[in-house]
Amino acid sequence: MRHPKIIIAGLGLAAVAAAGGITAASVGSSSAASVSPAQATVHTARATVAGKAETVLVNGRGLPLYYYRPDTATRSLVTGGLAQLWPPLTSAAPAVTGVGGKLAVLNDVNGQQVTYNGHPLYTFADDTAGQVTGQGVQDFFVVTPGLAPLTTSAAPAAPAPQSGVGY
């Protein structure tokens, strides 16, 4: 199931792009994607995820943090319109409190993107502090303190469709 706001935002973005209203520079320079070092503090908080209370990682404003399953430890695949909906957490010097995993900075297409256990981190445009609405949407998943480290190898390929299954 697709998230209705993502579909609407994607259609709007496509319409503006088709009309020539978006350039590569304007898409890549979203103020939502830029996060000041003070906001790049990562800590844990309780939030409801799929109807269940869980401890998740949040940024300095209390917004839940997500990882994107197709990313690799050396490359974020979230750019353009996708980065508008899933703003990357960026900072030259992120701080971490109360979390046992490894916080680092990956220099990539999104600038100095904060990673947790090798996973580039994102917020979701529809979330508010303590609210997780993007779980499982477009292959994004909320980050928990026990998130397994991402290795430097490529992300696993999607399983091949079974024969006889139509689309």
Image (cartoon, helix red, strand yellow):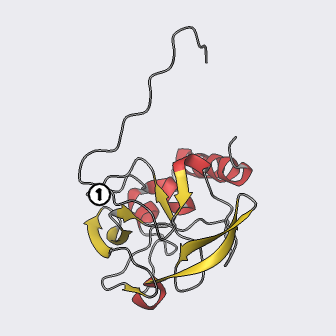
For label 1, count other residues whose C-alpha is less than 10 Å away and answer few (under 14), some (14-19) or many (20+).
some
In the rendered image, residue 86, in percent from the top left (x then y), is placed at 53, 62
Residue reaching furthest to the top: 164
Quadrant in which the N terminus appears: top right
Q: Is residue 55 left or right of residue 52?
A: left
The residue that appears at 47% across and 60% down in the rendered structure is 67
Q: Specify the farthest residue to the bottom.
A: 38
Q: Quadrant of residue 154?
A: top left
Q: Position of residue 163 (x, y in %)?
A: 51, 10
Residue nearer the viewer, 124 or 17: 124
Left or right of 2 on screen, residue 163: left
Coordinates of residue 146 in the picture (x, y in percent): 46, 66
Residue 19 seen in render: no
In the rendered structure, which amino acid carries the disc numbered 1?
Ala
Q: Quadrant of the C terminus?
A: top right
Kindly state the secondary structure of the residue where label 1 is placed. Answer: loop
Report if residue 50 is visible in the image: yes
Residue 58 image offset from top left, x and y in percent: 54, 77
Residue at the spot x=57%, y=72% of the render?
56
Q: From the viewer's side, name the closer residue of 66 and 38.
A: 66
Q: In this view, does 100 lie above or below 39?
A: above
Residue matched to label 1 = 73
The image quadrant that residue 76 belongs to is: bottom left
- Reply above or below: 158 against 165: below
* Quarter of the view holding residue 47: bottom right
Task: State the count of labels.
Answer: 1
Q: Is residue 37 above or below residue 153?
A: below
